[in-house]
Amino acid sequence: MNCSRIAEVIRKTSETEICLTLDLDGSGWARVETGIGMFDHLLTALARHSRFDLTLTCRGDLQVDDHHTVEDCALAIGAAIDQALGNRQGVTRFATGFAPLDEALVRSVIDLSGRGGAWVNLPIPVERIGLLSSENVPHFFRSLATAARLTLHQDLVRGENGHHIAEAAFKSFALAIRNATRPTNFGDIPSTKGTL
């Protein structure tokens, strides 16, 4: 198992500039600044409930819209998860997380398979939540799964309020990723192939 499960990622493009540090074995502490209040709130919830420590600053082209900021933050977080996991030796690998928020309930199922892919069903009934475009919530998870090389199935079980659905999605993902990355007492790579 990777003894130091900490990663640093710097991502600079013509659209965004991101600097982040991620500790898989943290306490849930976060300092997030993206310029999108709702997105900051959701990323803070992700860190809190995954018990990952996350420092993330992003300067994005918000004068265009929020798409590049959300997508690139997802890619950077995913890359940090992948980097911090190393060869994925000694991790639990599979996990499920259910998170309710009032009437909303979302299920996230994760496999740290080494193959990035996401099947996300999060119909949010409003176009925007604050300054965050609702369509960018599922896009965040698809982008993160690709960069983290994990398989994600995420479904809205029920829900009506857009804010509640989005927050339940981030919290359910946080619970699942926390359990999937949890170290086990086994020192092997959890795969019949011997690699992930």
Image (cartoon, rainbow, N blue to C red):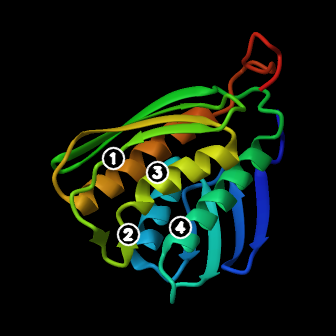
What type is the residue that disc 1 sits on?
Answer: Leu
Please give the name of the residue rendered at 21% of the width and 57% of the height, measured from the top-left corner.
125
Residue 70 disc label: 4
Compare marks 3 and 2 and give the one earlier in the sequence: 3
Q: Amino acid at mark 3?
A: His
Q: Which residue is mark 1?
A: 122
Q: Are marks 2 and 4 in contact (CB under 8 Å)?
A: yes
Q: Amino acid at mark 4?
A: Val
Q: Residues within 10 Å of mark 3 (few under 14, many from 20)?
A: many
* Alpha-carbon span between mark 3 and mark 1: 20 Å
Q: Marks 1 and 3: in contact by CB < 8 Å?
A: no
Q: Earlier in the sequence, mark 3 or mark 1?
A: 3
Q: Residue at x 55, y 40 (%)?
A: 177
Residue 24 shows up from this direction: no
Badge 2 or badge 1: first in the primary sequence: 1
Name, please, the residue furthest toward the front. 64
Q: Is residue 154 left or right of residue 18?
A: left
Q: Which mark is residue 133?
A: 2
Between the residue at mark 1 and the residue at mark 4, the CA separation in whole angstroms equals: 16 Å
Secondary structure of the residue carrying tag 3 is helix
